[in-house]
Image (cartoon, grey):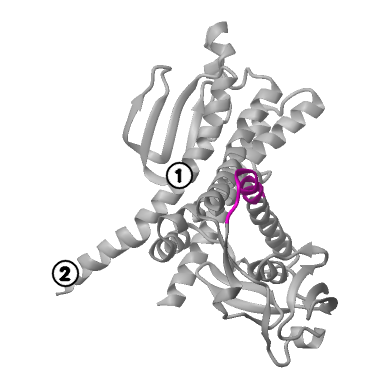
Amino acid sequence: MEIAASLWNGGHFLLGYLLPFLFVLTVVVFVHELGHFLVGRWCGVDVKTFSIGFGRELFGFNDKHGTRWRFALIPLGGYVKFSGDADASSMPDEASVERMTPQERARTFPAQSIGERAAIVAAGPIANFLLAILIFAGTAFFFGKQVLMPRVDAVIEGSAAERGGLKAGDIVIAIDGQPVDSFADMQRIVSTRPEETLAITVDRSGSPVTVSVVPALSEMKTPVGTQRIGVIGVKASPKPEDWRLQRFGLAESMRMGVTETWFVVARTYDYVGKLLRGRESADQLSGPIRIAQVSGIVASSGGLLGLINLAAILSVSIGLMNLFPVPMLDGGHLMFYLYEAVRGRPLSPRAQEIGFRLGLGLVLMLMLFVTWNDIVHVRGLL
């Protein structure tokens, strides 16, 4: 019986958590690296390797241009290695470049102009943002959006809403001048503005009324950790007639895709800013364990559509993370190119090597930290 239970648990982990996680991560990583690859090829750079994952190759093939497309043993990332790169981090291999013929050297990554190198590096994060926009836009275009009217059905006694003067039956029109079309819109604005004074305009019996409400700071347990959000203490309408399916045209869907992507970007930077100011906890920083857990939850509750939307959110997160000015990440490369453009010469090879080593150390420390966060979080659920 114990053996059967172990096999069942192992199969449940594989199908319920690992496969959804690998699906989401592989899509996001592939698109990121494809951005580097396509712009590199467009700039005339030879691509040696396109790898999904790190470590020993499981399987792969060579295309007609000589690029090795490979799937590796450790599926937690990927890389594109251009001609002239020393390794997967794109550190220049000056010794190898010097041994090349002038024709071969012209097709190396270091031989390209600053603008071309910057475009190739920035293409990865940009591809992530474009993927998110297309996913959000496609979801809106093909499936529409279930919208609940922003009607206040009840006001909780002693809440911020009661203190501010909101009443049952009010229909929220705008918050700080920003139009509100649904109850979800209201929740989104309020949740990101704890302890800030909000001017909430409502339709009260056909007349516009504006009240000032200060959302209370509340802690909410989620699969990715404890989130600190703003709440005002109102209940949504339970009436079926207050729900409607909103359809969108192509242009409106694209606008929604951009809006949703920007919301994830703004929310991420808001969290990082509050984290640096000590107003947020680092327990929301997640690694592969919690991402796998969330993937499994989304797959079981939201199906393929839920997983695709999770891929959009993760795509934005990976795009933003790669833009941080840390050597070894895309943002670190862009920082080096900015220095080169301003000073008229690149950093010395020794300085770049030290930068890459420091960047590697920072990335490894972050990976250890988020993995520890994941372990603590999972243990707390057991």
Residue at 66% of width from left, 57% of height from top?
268
Of the residues under marks 1 and 2, which one precedes in the sequence? 2
Residue at 80% of width from left, 79% of height from top?
213
* Left or right placement of residue 345 versus residue 211 in this view: left
* Viewer-proximal residue among 33 and 255: 255
Range of residues picked out in magenta: 247-258
Q: Quick check: is 46 in the magenta stretch?
A: no
Image height check: is 349 above or below 164?
above
Find the distance from the CA under tag 1 to the CA under tag 2: 34 Å
* Viewer-proximal residue among 143 and 78: 143
Give coordinates of residue 109: x percent, y percent. 58, 22
| Quadrant for the N terminus in the image | bottom left
| Quadrant for the C terminus in the image | bottom left
In the rendered image, which residue does mark 2 sit on?
3
Whether residue 87 is visible here, answered yes or no, is no
Q: Nearer the viewer, mark 1 or mark 2?
A: 1
In the rendered image, which residue does mark 1 sit on?
27
Image height check: is 194 above or below 350?
below
Whether residue 28 is visible here, answered yes or no, is yes
Amino acid type assigned to the residue bearing label 1 in the image: Val
* Left or right placement of residue 55 versus residue 151 in this view: left
- Which secondary structure is most common in the magenta stretch? helix
* Left or right placement of residue 2 versus residue 122 in this view: left
Amino acid type assigned to the residue bearing label 2 in the image: Ile
CB of mark 1 within 8 Å of CB of mark 2?
Answer: no
